[in-house]
Image: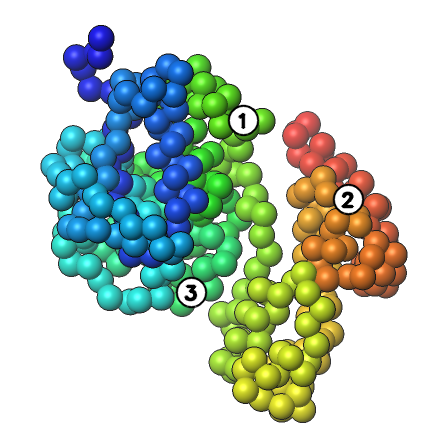
Amino acid sequence: MLPSQDPPLRVGFILLPLFTLNAFAGFIDSLRLAADKGGRSRQIHCSWNIMGPGPVISSCGLEVHPQTTYRDPTLFTHIAVCGGNNYLDPHEDKALSHYLKDAYRQGVKLVGVCTGTFAIARAGLLKGQRVCVHWNVINDFRQQFPHIDATPDRLFLESVRVITCAGSSGATDMALHLIRRECGPDKAQQAIRHMMLNGMRTSNSPQTHFFEAIQDIRDERVRVAVLTMEQSLNTRLDSQVLAKRINLSPRQLDRLFQQEMGTTPMRYFKTMRLRYAEWLLQHTDSSIAEIAAECGFSDASHLARDFQAHYTCSPKQSRLKGLSSQASVQAS
């Protein structure tokens, strides 16, 4: 028999055009698996409702039909706005903003999932708050909302009124965090077992990412080149291919880079790849050979030579140094 009282965790989902399915599915399925025994999907310990004015197409092309239009916000403990590839569209959805403001005024906690945080920011509800966004959109977020303190170094970040989540698999960790707090650790563990996860990551776990802060790069062509490099860290991108992608000759690109960055594009790209390798050494347990491949080096020896020349220590020494630093932080 279903309980007569409302579940302690009640989430209303709003899906934006081109929303990312991974983040939404991880969030809602965590709720589903914690809500009932044996994955039977009855909304006992958690409940959910998908709201919106009409059908929404995800970034992968799947069409979702909301169950209802916007409902009274007080029916929910949280309202989650799930975004995706529409974040560059500066148009504000007035009806959505009005609904989010109403929810905010009535004390319902808002959740920005993936680029859903952009919609909450456009509604003017993130002033004075620190927010978390995916590393791939951090520069665009800062450009659109320069007065909001945004970081790409967390999976999710919670304040009194708003939770912001980087999206992707981090949405699952955030959902498990909410389940554990609102429904109990046994319900969170139940969902973890069903999803065959090893556990859940905490909010301050680092995103598996690497990004360049480009807000101080004045020349738009150089900015585009740096973003292209960022998206190509595991490839052996050469100056000719890079220049062609932004409609310049290699000589023109080289001259612009020297003026703006004080170095050549390929030296900059190599340094970026080495910094990414260092980040992976500090934050993952991948082998050095795997990291070499991930960073576009031909093999572990190639990475080791360039890493030693740049950092004056080997990749192995860098990893040991990072482990020692983490142990000191944990002990203090």
Residue depicted at 70% across the width and 45% down the height = 282
Name the secondary structure under disc 3: helix
Name the secondary structure under disc 1: loop
Amino acid tagged 2: Ser
The one of 129 and 25 positioned closer to us in this rendering: 25
**Which labelled disc corresponds to residue 137?**
none
Q: Quadrant of residue 14?
A: top left
The one of 315 and 24 positioned closer to us in this rendering: 24
Amino acid tagged 1: Met
The one of 95 and 22 positioned closer to us in this rendering: 22
Which residue was labeled with disc 3?
A: 140
Categorize mark 3 by other alpha carbons within 10 Å: few (<14), some (14-19), many (20+). Answer: some
Residue depicted at 69% across the width and 36% down the height = 326
Residue 62 image offset from top left, x and y in percent: 34, 50
Query: In front of the other: label 3 or label 2?
Result: 2
Q: Are marks 3 and 2 in contact (CB under 8 Å)?
A: no
Categorize mark 2 by other alpha carbons within 10 Å: few (<14), some (14-19), many (20+). Answer: few
Q: Are marks 2 and 1 in contact (CB under 8 Å)?
A: no
Name the secondary structure under disc 2: loop
Which residue was labeled with disc 1?
A: 196
Residue depicted at 71% across the width and 58% down the height = 295
Residue 143 image offset from top left, x and y in percent: 40, 67
Q: Can you say which quadrant of the picture contains the N terminus?
A: top left
Disc nearer the start of the sequence (1/3): 3
Extreme residue in the top direction? 1
Residue 205 image offset from top left, x and y in percent: 55, 39
Residue 155 image offset from top left, x and y in percent: 49, 42
Amino acid tagged 3: Asp
Which residue was labeled with disc 2?
A: 287
